Image (cartoon, rainbow, N blue to C red):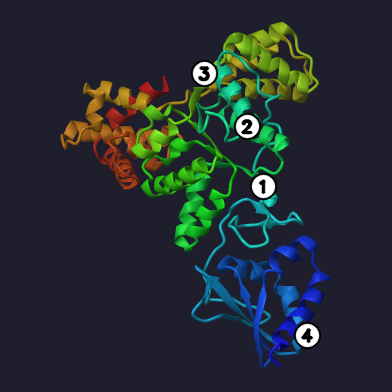
Amino acid sequence: MNNEHWTAWDSCLRIIRDNIPAGSFKTWFEPIVPVKLEERVLTIQVPSAFFYEYLEEQFIDILRKTLKMVLGIGAKLEYNVVMGNNSTSESPYTVKYPTTNNTKFQNKPLDLPITSENKSVIRNPFVIPGIQKLQIDPQLKPENTFENFVEGECNRLARSAGYAVAQNPGGTAFNPLVIFGNSGLGKTHLAQAIGIETKERFPDKVVLYVNANKFQTQFTDSTRYNNRNDFLNFYQMIDVLILDDVHEFAGKEKTQETFFHIFNHLHMSGKQLILTSDKPPIELKGMESRLLSRFKWGLTADLTIPDFETRMEILKKKIYKDGIVLSDEVLEYIASHITNNVRELEGALVSLLAQSMLNRKEITLDLASKLINKLVKNSKRELSIEYISKVVCDYFNIPVDSLQAKTRKREVVQARQITMYFSKNMTKYSLASIGAQIGNKDHATVLHACKTVLNLKETDKNFRLYVEDIEKKLKM
């Protein structure tokens, strides 16, 4: 009969529907179309290559048992995978149950944040028929709210702009909203607070927080496994995209090009973009000018080191939330001695509370002073590539600008290599970002420079002394 494949598949669906959650059935089985049935080989058409792989990974047991019940022993399943513009693959992939290693299909799902209606994790966020927008996990930490973000002179503009964006995402002049500042000042907290407030006000909005390094990994995987169009489609469906540490894109031309297209699509569609960086757009190096120009379309707001009053307010809010009572003199001592950033401030308070609980001692000014002085003494100053460049160039008595020049002078090349070496070992920047900021070099050049410095340290006594002297200056 011409319709026997439909009859067989309907019988399979009735069994499967009774054995899996309704959400999973709707997402993963309703889009499937039976194609043919020949000699106990049932061919089904699936919407994408990933769709095929996910069925194999998550529903292999139920498929195997169902086919056996409906078609008998020896039943097989073939897939027609839709490729591109509704065309099917050149030949379907044959799956025999129980499935062993299937070498015909090597497409790997990417680690991106979508969950199905039954809350099981799907390791691919791409646009797949049946997946609804509300199923995308925004990747926001519940504690990073506006309520928990203390306002002060150091962040008032950024916080006010962020709150305005949350009230009308994509509808203000603050698009994109670029928040910049040094590490530990609250960029991630504020960016996520915007996302949380947006979700509370507009539950149907698709909000997603992603770190630039995560985005880069996803893009690399999508290129490697030929899922690039799916990658683009996924990000183009976001209503509020929060990209953290965008400066990590420095020197990564293909990633920048892809984000450029995503940015354009979202902005033209009236969607909201929120970016964080350690520097304002005008100071970002290794970034395409057309991308930087778009960063300047909206508002750029900075976060600076909080003043004493703000630091006190942060500490008071923290102990109130945790139900702890501390004297004002203890809080004032902490706020007076931990001044670099909010993360260190809260970390010092946590350390003090832990010390008190473990040793069963009351938190006095004396206890606080001993612990805080130790933390301040042992804390490592966060170095920047600019600072390292200055220290190295001052040591060799050459202009800092010479590191950016295209020259093969021995003293400049040596200084540039040492700067790259210390930047790799003393900062959080990637090789590509370091290279982009030091002479506009690629990551391979930075890696070569680091190996060269290590080799010369072992073979050249004078060079080793240079490096050791510079290292002492950087650690002072």
The answer for how far apart the CA atoms under marks 4 and 1 are is 37 Å
The answer for how far apart the CA atoms under marks 1 and 2 are is 21 Å
**Which amino acid lies under the numbered mark 3 shown in the image of this protein?**
Thr
Residue beneath disc 3: 304
Placement of 224 over or under 305, stated as above or below: below
Placement of 236 over or under 240, stated as above or below: below
The answer for how far apart the CA atoms under marks 3 and 2 are is 26 Å
Residue beneath disc 2: 168
Q: Is residue 287 visible?
A: no
Q: On the image, which quarter does residue 9 sit in?
A: bottom right
Mark with earlier residue (1, 2) = 1
Contact between marks 1 and 3 (CB within 8 A): the answer is no
Helix, strand, or loop for circle 1?
A: loop
**Which amino acid lies under the numbered mark 1 shown in the image of this protein?**
Asp
Contact between marks 1 and 2 (CB within 8 A): the answer is no
Q: Is residue 104 visible?
A: yes
